[in-house]
Amino acid sequence: MTKSTKIFALFAFTFASSALIAEDGFIEGFPDIPKLEIVSEIAGDPVVFDTPSGTVAEATLLTSNKGTEALNAYKTALSALGWSCKRPPQSLKCTRGGNTVTFLNDIPQAETGRIILRLAPTK
């Protein structure tokens, strides 16, 4: 792959990922996690607290489709933002800059889902 091909592929990947992000940008309490169009936040979330090793935050997101589709969309979006992601079944774990974000598909078989999002310092 030539250098110009790699640059074009990165641009196309980034553009495709940005189309998934909702107009209001990022999830409340998670400034580095984009709010995708397929999720909605629950009022009263997130729960944020400080620990000796750093800030921990947790929120629940509702999905307009299956949770697995939302996990796949988050893997694409976060990878484009520089996160390193792994996608085991029913979850997604991404790391970047000393932080780890984990998404857990809470209701795997449902047509619409619920995802638990947790941000914590990388150990």
Image (spheres, helix red, strand yellow):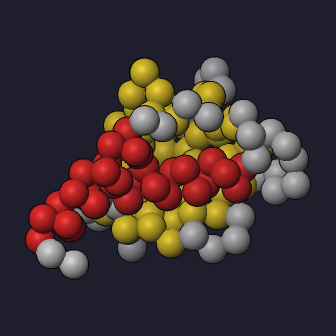
Residue that appears at 61% across and 28% down: 41
Foreground residue among 13 and 113: 13
Q: Please tell me which residue is depicted at 57% across the width and 70% down the height of the picture.
A: 87
Which corner quadrant holds the C terminus?
bottom left
Q: Is residue 46 left or right of residue 27?
A: right
Q: How many marks?
A: 0
| Quadrant position of the N terminus in the picture | bottom left
Q: Position of residue 27 (x, y in %)?
A: 46, 33
Q: Is residue 36 left or right of residue 99?
A: right
Relative height, residue 47 to residue 85 (above, below): above
* Residue 30 in sight here: no
Residue 68 appears left or right of 10: right
Q: Where is 35 relative to 122, above or below?
A: above
Q: Quadrant of residue 13?
A: bottom left
- Residue 8 visible to an observer of this rendering: yes
Residue 98 percent location from the top left of the image: 29, 64
Taking depth in this image into account, of 83 and 38 the one nearest to the observer is 38
Q: Nearer the viewer, residue 79 or 118?
A: 79
Asked where in the image residue 52 lies, by quadrant, the reply is bottom left
Residue 51 vertical placement versus 40 (above, below)? below
Q: Where is residue 24 in the image (x, y as percent from the top left)?
A: 42, 21
Specify whether 12 is left or right of 29. left
- At 63% across and 48% down in the image, what residue appears? 70
x and y percentages locating residue 58 in the rendered image: 56, 45
Q: Which residue lies furthest to the bottom in this view?
A: 1
